[in-house]
Image: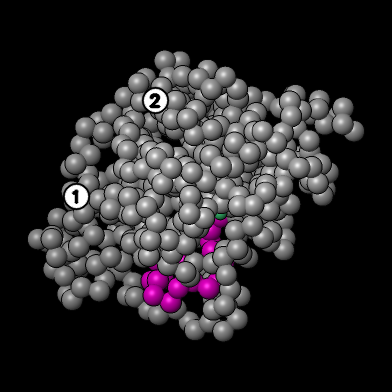
Amino acid sequence: MKRLLFVLLATLPCSTQALQQLFPGGTYNSAVPTPQSVLGYEIGDRFTDFRSLERYIDKLVASSDRIKRITYGSTNEQRPLQLLIISSPQNLTRLDEIKAGNKKLTDPRTLKSKAEAEQLINSLPGIVWFSYGVHGNESSSPEAAILTAYQLCAGTDERTKNILDNLVVLIDPAVNPDGRERYVQWANAATGIKPNTNPDAYEHSEPWPSGRTNHYFFDLNRDWAWQTQRETQARIPLYRTWMPHAHVDFHEMGYTSTYFFFPAAAPIHAEFPPEVKKWGAIYGKGNAEAFDKLGSGYYTAEFFDLYYPGYGDSWPTFNGAIGMTYEQAGGANVAIKKPDGTLLTLRQRALNHFTTGIATLETTVRHKQERLQDFFWILGIRIEKPVAYQGIPHQRRVRPEPRSAACENTHHAGHRSPPTARNSITGCSAFLHC
Ligand SMILES: [Zn+2]
């Protein structure tokens, strides 16, 4: 069996070839370096430490006119916090104009008329923010950040160009660099040349205190609303200058599971307008179609709520975005055998996050005007009779139906596995039941 498993691992497609399989019709600019050419290994062969992640970003910034990078702060252990801004070269030359126009949409009092609002809604690109690695030991998502940034900077096909023409994509490749580095240094040291796929092997059992939290062992995915931690305090002012229309927080859950994306499970916060449910279903449908093409497993709406405002899905949703959590089966080293005998590899985990990331971007492009209109409506709804709302046909806000006390007590548990592994895409009605 060991020999068979080694053969399976050795014959897995390399990640850049796999990208082309995941991205049919994809063509690439050879002047933009592949991850393998910089890192010396294919994504998924081992964990990318933080310095190597920085080194690859340096190469992307030096070789592509589609990317800018800003350093918005530093961690307690003095690692830089970085945001990649990726779009068409034309959009990158007018970022200040885009941010100023989008800021107006966040407050209808700054608009003179309905026509001005409509002009902005029709002309602005969508803004999508991807946060990778808030839990440092949910380790496939920064690897997916590398693949996603490469695709967007190097892709010369029409699909990639359509994304870049219509969106500004903001990528935080490592929200919690200290936690990630704590995990990666342990994980790379704990495994040998050949991965041990036995779930009981030491390399799959990270010791305390784990890389989930930041330097002070604080869970940054509980801090968005309260901003007690240095990383959050640096990020939120930057977030407020962008006010994205969609935000995805990439996570991992137990290795026996499949993949979770929205619609979220109950409870949904009672202050969210009905549009939040609608958008969870729209983005879920886009992700489901992408996974169905691959034959990959997923589920929705059975787990992971949208209630506590300190999460990386709820807080962005309170700020006008559709904020979503995506959860990949993981929490293991580079390869682990699942109870059904199949292998779960780091490469597949990263590729799945890549797949939902691209699907989320393409869904935003398809529904851009409606997404911006809802963004405008939701953020301005508490303001008394704004002139820019006059004549805009839209559903009035209604309170969601009351939920049971049992629903209200549901918690977001990052490492628990859901009860099922079947594919399902659940409609909006599921939000009101637990
Ligand atoms: Zn997590």
In-front residue for pair 328/296: 328
Percent position of residue 22, x then y: 58, 33
Name the residue type under label 1: Gly
Q: Is residue 130 visible?
A: no
Instruction: Tell me if residue 273 is in the magenta stretch.
Output: yes
Tell me the crowding category of disc 2: few under 14, some 14 to 19, or many 20 or more residues within 10 angstroms, Cα based: few
Location of mark 2 (residue):
58
x%, y% of residue 24? 55, 30
Of pointers 1 and 2, the one earlier in the residue sequence: 2
Q: Quadrant where the N terminus lies?
A: top right
Q: Going 33% across and 33% down the picture, which residue do you hit?
A: 69
Residue underneath mark 1: 101
Q: Which residues are magenta?
A: 261-279
Q: Give me the residue at 16% from left, 70% from top.
A: 386
Quick one: 306 or 334, which is closer to the camera? 334
Q: Crowding at label 1, few (<14), some or many (≥20) Cα neighbours within 10 Å? A: some
Dividing the image into 4 quarters, which one contains the C terminus? bottom right
Which residue sits at x=57%, y=77%?
Answer: 409
**Relative to 274, residue 262 above or below:** above
Q: Is residue 346 left or right of residue 24?
A: right
Position of residue 56 measured from the top left corner of the image (x, y, whole percent): 45, 26
Q: Is residue 216 left or right of residue 1?
A: left
Q: Quadrant of ligand 1?
A: bottom right
Q: Quadrant of residue 55?
A: top left
